[in-house]
Image: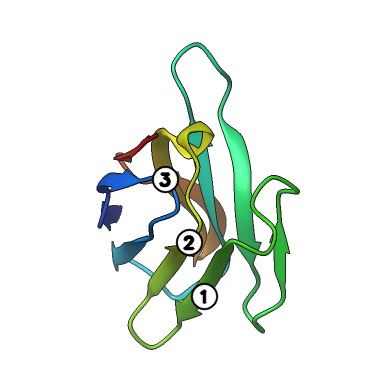
């Protein structure tokens, strides 16, 4: 059994910053790609950023230059540093990880709310 637990969401003003963290625990041999997604009300869940095991990153165009994804493999954590926040960044942010324990299986966190006021 694997759990992904996000923390760090909350309220920020436009132009401000927030940092998200996600911790993986449970039956884990290793972790492949780790990602952050977000879903605004009435919208589909969209990919925000991905980081591979060797640290290669990929970002949605809407957050390039403002968000930074990183990971700590020893701590089984992934982070999302968000700066220059905009009201359109308001969404529930979800952690996603591909966990390897005999087989590769994707897992989702429960989500954390980020609200950016104008």
Please tell me which residue lies in front, 32 or 112.
Answer: 112
Residue that label 2 marks: 83
First along the sequence among labels 3 and 2: 3
Which residue shows up at 25% across the image and 57% down it? Answer: 8
- Distance between the alpha carbons at the discs numbered 3 and 2: 9 Å
Q: Relative to residue 50, is residue 20 drawn left or right?
A: left
Decide: marks 1, 3 in contact (CB < 8 A)? no
Could you say whether the residue bearing mark 1 is in a helix, strand or loop?
Answer: strand
Could you say whether the residue bearing mark 2 is in a helix, strand or loop?
Answer: loop
Dot label at residue 14: 3
Q: Relative to residue 113, is residue 88 drawn left or right?
A: right
- Binning the other alpha carbons within 10 Å of mark 1 as few (below 14), some (14 to 19) or many (20 upward) gives many
Q: Quadrant of the C terminus?
A: top left
Which residue shows up at 33% across the image and 83% down it? Answer: 75
Decide: marks 2, 1 in contact (CB < 8 A)? no
Residue 72, position as x, y percentages in the image: 43, 83
- Distance between the alpha carbons at the discs numbered 1 and 3: 23 Å
In the depicted structure, whether residue 102 falls above or below residue 112? below
- Binning the other alpha carbons within 10 Å of mark 2 as few (below 14), some (14 to 19) or many (20 upward) gives some
Residue that label 1 marks: 70
Which numbered disc, 1 or 3, marks the residue closer to the eye?
A: 3
- Distance between the alpha carbons at the discs numbered 2 and 1: 14 Å
- Binning the other alpha carbons within 10 Å of mark 3 as few (below 14), some (14 to 19) or many (20 upward) gives some
First along the sequence among labels 1 and 3: 3
Residue 73, position as x, y percentages in the image: 45, 83
Which residue shows up at 53% across the image and 43% down it? Answer: 37
């Amino acid at each position: 059994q694997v759990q992904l637990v996000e923390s760090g969401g909350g309220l920020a003003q436009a132009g401000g910053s927030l940092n998200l963290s996600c911790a993986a625990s449970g039956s884990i041999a290793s972790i492949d790609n780790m990602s952050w997604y977000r879903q605004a009300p009435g919208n589909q869940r969209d990919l925000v950023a991905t980081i591979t095991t060797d640290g290669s990153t990929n970002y949605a165009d809407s957050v390039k230059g403002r968000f930074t994804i990183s990971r700590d493999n020893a701590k089984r954590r992934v982070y999302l540093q968000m700066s220059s926040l905009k009201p359109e960044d308001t969404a529930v942010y979800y952690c996603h990880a591909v966990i390897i324990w005999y087989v590769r299986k994707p897992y989702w966190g429960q989500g954390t709310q980020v609200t950016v006021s104008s």
